[in-house]
Amino acid sequence: MIKKTYTQFQKYTYIYFAFVLTFLLLGKSYAYEAKEDYLFEVQFGNLIVGKAEVSVISDEKKIIVKAKTRTAGFLNTFYEYQGELISISQENKEFWKPYKFTTKGLFNNKNRYSNLTWGPDKSVSYKLDPVLDLKEVHRIDKSSLINVMDPLTSIINVIENIKNKKSCDQNFKIFDGRRRYDLKIKSLGEGILKNDRPKSFSGDVIICGLRMFPIGGHRLKSKWKPEEDKFSDFKVFFGTTSSGLLFPVRMNLERWFGTVVVRLVSKDI
């Protein structure tokens, strides 16, 4: 049971961190180059099972996100996972466009690598090692790769929409090299979070809900039924920190195998 549960957990982990990393940029100015470092913890049930160390470098022309993720606690007894992610997004008038997106990780003693580059015509070229195993996952049709974005750049554009229109609502075509899916994001209103962990946030929050619709790269056999998902199953909470910035302070994901919670860990909140 633990092996099956963690296989499902690991499959979603990278997506969770992708959203968290980019939401960090909300409320910042891009008029100067700045670098900041952050730490996130992933909770599954009552245990801390993962951590992410994040660096964000931004200016008025580009945003670079670097992250290192790893399992923690009891999961290392069964499966040890380590991963790295680098994303570069470029400013393009009223929105941000993808430029480069690279991920690599070690899971089950197997290395996985993806490298994506976007050209001036919005076309994407990519390299995978190993290539997709079509006995395990659905094929990604090249015709579905028109006007796609990596998940980080798409969320940066959602951030701009929140800043300008006070709304989370937006749709994107997402491609990360191994998965192609459509992403829909919806405003779920406001609420109040209680401090349920040391150094966690307590106060008023803005809530966004997310849904993903698989196009290719998802497993042939899976308990996931995306048509049954609700926006309330995957929620991102934004709160104002003591420094006055609107930050992602928590993410909750409800799945058949349990609840996953991602928290920003900071002495400043």
Image (cartoon, rainbow, N blue to C red):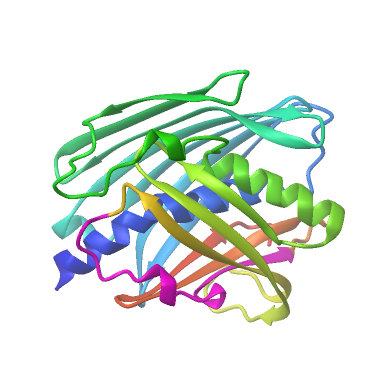
Asked where in the image residue 13 lies, by quadrant, the reply is: bottom left
Instruction: Read off the magenta span.
Output: 219-239
Asked where in the image residue 31 lies, by quadrant, the reply is: top right
Residue occupying image coordinates x 17% and y 66%: 4
Residue positioned most to the top: 120
Q: Which of 179 and 33 is in front in this view?
A: 179
Residue occupying image coordinates x 43% and y 72%: 227
**Image location (x, y in percent) of residue 30:** 79, 33
Position of 225 relative to 85 (above/below): below
Residue occupying image coordinates x 61% and y 45%: 154
- 222 left or right, relative to 167: left
**Image location (x, y in percent) of residue 27:** 79, 49
Residue positioned most to the front: 143
Residue 243 visible in the picture: no
Image quadrant holding the N terminus, namely: bottom left
Q: Nearer the viewer, residue 68 or 174?
A: 174
Q: Is residue 232 magenta?
A: yes
Image quadrant holding the C terminus, namely: bottom right
**Image location (x, y in percent) of residue 146:** 52, 35
Position of 143 relative to 250 (above/below): above
Asked where in the image residue 79 lies, by quadrant, the reply is: bottom left
**Image location (x, y in percent) of residue 197:** 52, 74
Position of 231 relative to 119 (above/below): below
